[in-house]
Amino acid sequence: MKALVVMGHPCPESFNHAIAGTIAGAWRAAGCEVAFHDLVQEGFDPRLTAAEARGEASADPLVQVHVAQLLDCDLLAVVHPNCWGAPPAIVKGWIDRVFAPGAAHGFAKGEDMGDEPVGLLKAKAALVVNTGNTPAERERAVFGDPLERIWCDCLLHYCGVRQVVRRLFGVVATSSPDERRGWLADTEALAAQALRQASHPDA
């Protein structure tokens, strides 16, 4: 099984890196072929070009690699912090450029005329892990957890990925080493859950 793990956090010592590394390690240990991308470290350019905005395929070689790996993966993981209820700019740019029309999604009439989209991704399951500094109860009650809507409804389901596992860990800023170890143990369990869903999508 082929898996793609993508993370976006500006600090190389961040807890996001520990989460992404845990997911990649768990999937490799299970026999998956894992492609791993740290968007910041590899200098991914988040700026959508005018041609890409018109639906043309990207001419950027790095974007082409990401698109090819997204289309080829059976299992996807994305890790990033919550930034104002949205992914950070580098992850949003990755979405804009890599989940491209004609690659991740299409339309029955060949172009976006307001019709129902056709999801083109073959990935059977995805795991999205976010970190934040808002208590879970306040996140749900005050903000409505917009990342849940973005990842599950507006993106992954839209592009054909039916099984999505998502978790928000926090409050990270005041967390203890024991809490972080517990979250990493939870991450291993979530990775195993997503792997089972990708392996048995109709179960």
Image: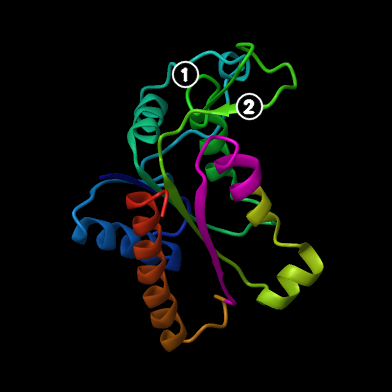
Identify the residue at image location x=51%, y=37%. 94
The answer to whether residue 203 is above or below residue 51 is below
Q: Secondary structure at mark 2?
A: strand
Judged by depth in the image, the label closer to the viewer, 1 or 2, is 2
What is the CA distance from the residue labelled 1 to the residue labelled 2?
A: 21 Å
Q: Position of residue 67 (x, y in %)?
A: 41, 29
Identify the residue at image location x=57%, y=13%. 51
Q: Position of residue 169 (x, y in %)?
A: 54, 71
Name the residue beneath numbered marker 2.
Answer: 117
The answer to whether residue 98 is above or below residue 92 is above
Let me know if residue 6 is in the magenta part: no
Instruction: Find residue 35 and report its image quarter.
Output: top left
User: Which image quadrant: the C terminus?
Assistant: bottom left
Q: Is residue 99 left or right of residue 21?
A: right
Let me know if residue 159 is in the magenta part: yes
Which range of residues does the magenta coloring cover?
151-171
Instruction: Find residue 197 and report its image quarter.
Output: bottom left
Q: Secondary structure at mark 1?
A: loop
